Image: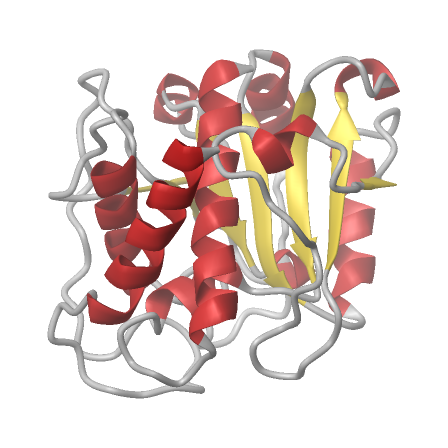
């Protein structure tokens, strides 16, 4: 408990001071303004943040999958490097599709805005193979009616894996930090967050294959952790959740 307290204190200090010189722009859509895209990183055994690219439902200029990119992952990798021994890449992050065989080299993949998630037949086969081979999925940044598209696409990919609401009793909330409460809210509309998962063979004693942050957006909290737009307490909780997700993915 003493070591956990020290880590929590370190996180509270680190989050507000992270800064990488980006232009301010809370409330914008898409890529972080003024930011140079990260270079994709070749696999070398080190942990690399992987963001999934897809053709957004309805098309248009807003790509959806790139929301909070690259500030969210840049900030998060610094936190992960400071607080764990994982040793993540700090010099880049990967954008991959589910049809790219490179994705199988990485244990966790982040899908932003699954309310607009689409898959072609090759991507559909790819996400199934990714999960069946041990990959862990993190769905984030969706709210309200966005649930219906996410649910439909999940059922299309995994018709036999039920979506189940998670409670604090699940090990993912104690894989590094002991999360004390799941009472979070969407940073823009204030909707109360719900954490949803799916288990291998629908068996809660087996591996959790994904987690979905519904009515939440930990990407936003991480992106703007150096801007003062969002409450520090909730920003800290977002980082704790993200660290736990990676630790769970690396150990299950």
Q: Percent position (x, y) of residue 117?
A: 62, 54
Taking the spot 68% from the left edge, 81% from the top edge, the residue there is 190
User: Vertical placement of 21 versus 219: above or below?
Assistant: below
Q: Quadrant of the C terminus?
A: top right
**Residue 52: quarter of image:** top left
State the residue in front, 29 or 234.
234
Decide if residue 22 is on the left or right side of residue 131: left
**Residue 34: quarter of image:** bottom left
Q: Percent position (x, y) of residue 236?
A: 44, 60
Taking the spot 35% from the left edge, 53% from the top edge, the residue there is 9
Report the residue that reaches farthest toward the front. 2
State the residue in front, 89 or 106.
89
Task: Evaluate whether residue 70 shows in this view.
Answer: no
Q: Percent position (x, y) of residue 82?
A: 21, 41
Count of marks, rendered view:
0
**Residue 140: quarter of image:** bottom right
User: Vertical placement of 238 versus 104: above or below?
Assistant: below
Decide if residue 122 is on the left or right side of residue 193: left
User: Vertical placement of 162 versus 24: above or below?
Assistant: above
Looking at the picture, the colour scheme in use is secondary structure
User: Vertical placement of 124 versus 78: above or below?
Assistant: above
Taking the spot 50% from the left edge, 75% from the top edge, the residue there is 60
Taking the spot 55% from the left edge, 21% from the top edge, the residue there is 130
């Amino acid at each position: 408990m003493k070591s956990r307290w020290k880590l929590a204190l370190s996180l509270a200090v680190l989050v507000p001071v992270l800064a990488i010189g980006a232009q301010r722009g809370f409330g914008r859509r898409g890529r972080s303004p003024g930011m140079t895209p990260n270079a994709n990183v070749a696999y070398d055994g080190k942990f690399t943040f992987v963001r999934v690219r897809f053709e957004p439902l309805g098309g248009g200029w807003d790509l959806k999958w790139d929301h909070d990119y690259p500030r969210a992952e840049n900030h998060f990798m610094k936190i992960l490097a400071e607080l764990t021994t994982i040793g993540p890449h700090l010099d880049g992050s990967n954008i991959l599709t589910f049809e790219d065989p490179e994705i199988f080299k990485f244990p966790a993949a982040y899908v932003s805005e699954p309310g607009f998630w689409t898959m072609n037949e090759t991507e559909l086969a790819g996400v199934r193979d990714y999960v069946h081979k041990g990959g862990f999925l993190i769905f984030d940044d969706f709210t309200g009616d966005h649930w219906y598209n996410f649910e439909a696409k999940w059922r299309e990919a995994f018709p036999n894996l039920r979506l189940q609401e998670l409670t604090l009793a699940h090990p993912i909330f104690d894989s590094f930090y002991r999360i004390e409460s799941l009472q979070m809210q969407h940073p823009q509309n204030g909707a109360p967050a719900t954490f949803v998962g799916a288990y291998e063979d629908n068996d809660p004693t087996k591996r959790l294959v994904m987690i979905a942050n519904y009515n939440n957006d930990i990407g936003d909290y991480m992106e703007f952790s150096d801007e003062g737009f969002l409450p520090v307490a909730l920003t800290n909780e977002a980082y704790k959740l993200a660290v736990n997700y990676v630790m769970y993915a690396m150990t299950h």
